Structures are given as structure tokens and as C-alpha cells.
Image: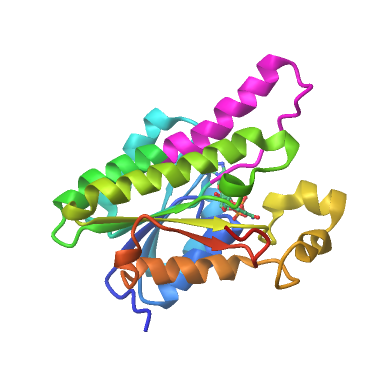
Amino acid sequence: MIDLTSKIVFITGAGGEIGSATARTLVQAGAEVVLHDLSTEALAGMSSDLGASAHSLTSDLGNPLATGDLWDRAVAVHGRIDVLVNMAGVYLSAPIDEPLDGWLNVWEKSLAINLVSPGVLCRGAVRTFAEQPNGGIVINIASRAAFRGEDPDYWHYAAAKAGIVAMTKTIARHYGRQGVTAFAIAPGYVDTSFNQAFRDEFGVETAAADTGLGEVAMPQDIANVIAFLASGLARHATGTTIDVNGASYVR
Ligand SMILES: NC(=O)c1ccc[n+]([C@@H]2O[C@H](COP(=O)([O-])OP(=O)(O)OC[C@H]3O[C@@H](n4cnc5c(N)ncnc54)[C@H](O)[C@@H]3O)[C@@H](O)[C@H]2O)c1
């Protein structure tokens, strides 16, 4: 049922664990992917695995101004993009008893990568999609933290992801008539090195015990939902956020 043949999908953070599972899943469903990450090393394995279906771009999303150019470079690869997946993210600790300047540095970096640069890419996407005959789809990776809040050292992360959800709703409400649909996905604990600090301190079984399923999600569980949204089959669900958290937090 999910056929992405002839769709061009741009994925940020595509060298990461959820990003690479997503790229592979979308290519298996027929898509061509434009992959982004911080460095060519992060994408090295992906390009060779996916062959002609993948093109790679690098940039630091810590610089939102430069991110405008990233969108233009992504569009230039095939002359159009059908789906934007804002996947890249960071999870940086900012303890409350840090000196204020260090605490603020983490906030600024986290907001730049987790919220402002995704916003710049959405801005580019909405402008481009509005000009394309078939419009386009925005898929923003948020987090359970947007709704439930996050552990004490990660206020900025929860705030950034809540911003992602609000931004996604705004895009959906105002640009649908121009062919733009927009979705957020809010994963709970996914078993990747993103959670290394939690794994080391509490173990993955602690996260699993917190879910209704008794298990944590794997990157493929998120990739499957992205493939569904990228297909266009969920068009009338625009503006929604899909929780993928094993019922660890039911809204
Ligand atoms: N793993 C989880 O439990 C979990 C839960 C909820 C949401 N998420 C979200 O899922 C997304 C992917 O997470 P993941 O678990 O695959 O982590 P990951 O660390 O494997 O992937 C993140 C990717 O973002 C890239 N990135 C980081 N900083 C960057 C920068 N400045 N410029 C460009 N790229 C940069 C990294 O190089 C990496 O490839 C993130 O947005 C994260 O917030 C993850």
C-alpha cells in the first residue's frame, strides 16, 4: 500500500540511527532521498548502501542562517522536494546548578539545532511546496517531551520540541490551500545512542518498564510512521502529532 515511487524526500540527520532507518525504509518503498548530516563521515555508509537513490549534503544546523542555503541546495539536487523530514537533533545536558553562561550556551545550541534550523527548513519548504503543482509534505520529529516534559537537565529540549509541535500546527492551518500538509511525530524512548546517558544510568529496561507494551521502540518503528505520512495517505490528518511511545504517555 505504501508506494513512494517518484517521491523526492529530504531528510536531515540522516546519518543518525532513526534517520538512517528512515532513509532505508523510504528507498525500499521507492523514494529517492536527499540525505543531510553534520559531516560526510556521518553519511558515508548510507550513500554506499543506497546507491543512486541517495544524494548527500552536509551542514551544521547550529547555524540557522546557513540553513537557508541548505534548503536551496537540497532542492537543487533534483529540482524539487516532495517531502521534508526534519530529523536532526541533539540532547544536551544543562544542569540547573551550572553557571548561567554555560547553561545559556546549551539553550542556544539546543534551540538552534532542535527548533530554529528546522523552522528555517520549514520556511523554505512551504515557499517551495506552494509553487509546486503537487505541493509537499512536512514531517517534523518532535518528542514525548513536548507534552510530558523532560528530565531535569533538559528543559531546553522539551521547550524546543514543544515549539516544533506548535510550528507544525501553524503550518498545517495556514498553508493547506497551497498544497502543504504538515505532521509531527512524538517518539518516546527509542533505543538509540541519543539516550546513552539514560542507558548508562538507569538501563533500557527502566524505559521499557514505563511503557504499556513493556518494550521500547526501535528506529524502525519511527521510520514506518514516517513512510506512512510521506505517502500522502494521511492528508486529512494534517496538523496532527502521532505519538510513538508504547503508551508510556497517553494524551
Ligand atoms: N532516540 C530517542 O529516544 C528519541 C526520542 C524522541 C525524539 N527523538 C528525536 O529523533 C531524532 C533523531 O534521534 P536519534 O535517536 O536518531 O539520534 P542520533 O543522534 O542517532 O541522530 C541525530 C542526528 O542529528 C545529527 N546532528 C546533530 N547535531 C547536528 C548539527 N548541528 N547539524 C547537523 N546535524 C546534526 C547527528 O549527526 C545525528 O546524525 C532527533 O530529532 C531526536 O530529538 C529521539
Q: Would you say 247 lies left or right of 95 here? A: left
Residue 244 pos. (x, y %):
57, 64
Q: Would you say 133 lies left or right of 193 here? A: left
State which quarter of the image contains the N terminus. bottom left
Q: Give 155 or 10, whichever is nearer the viewer.
A: 155
Q: Residue at x 73, y 42 (%)?
A: 151
Count of number-bearing discs: 0
Q: Give 75 or 158, whichever is nearer the viewer.
A: 158
Task: Please identify the quarter of the rendering in which residue 80 is found.
Answer: bottom left
Q: Residue at x 28, y 60 (%)?
A: 82
Residue 174 pos. (x, y %):
24, 46
Residue 216 pos. (x, y %):
70, 66
Q: Residue at x 76, y 21 (%)?
A: 98
Q: Main secondary structure of the magenta part?
A: helix
Residue 9 pos. (x, y %):
35, 61
Q: Residue at x 23, y 54 (%)?
A: 176
Residue extent of the magenta highlight: 89-118
Q: Would you say 142 lies left or right of 104 here? A: left
Q: How is the image coloured?
A: rainbow
Q: Give 82 or 181, whichever is nearer the viewer.
A: 181
Task: Please identify the quarter of the rendering in which residue 132 is found.
Answer: bottom left
Q: Would you say 178 lies left or right of 222 here? A: left
State which quarter of the image contains the C terminus. bottom right
Q: Is residue 58 visible?
A: no
Residue extending farthest front: 251
Whether residue 214 is situated above or below residue 60 in the rendered picture: below
Q: Is residue 101 magenta?
A: yes
Q: Give 147 or 67, whichever is nearer the viewer.
A: 147
Q: Is residue 126 visible?
A: yes
Q: Is residue 49 magenta?
A: no
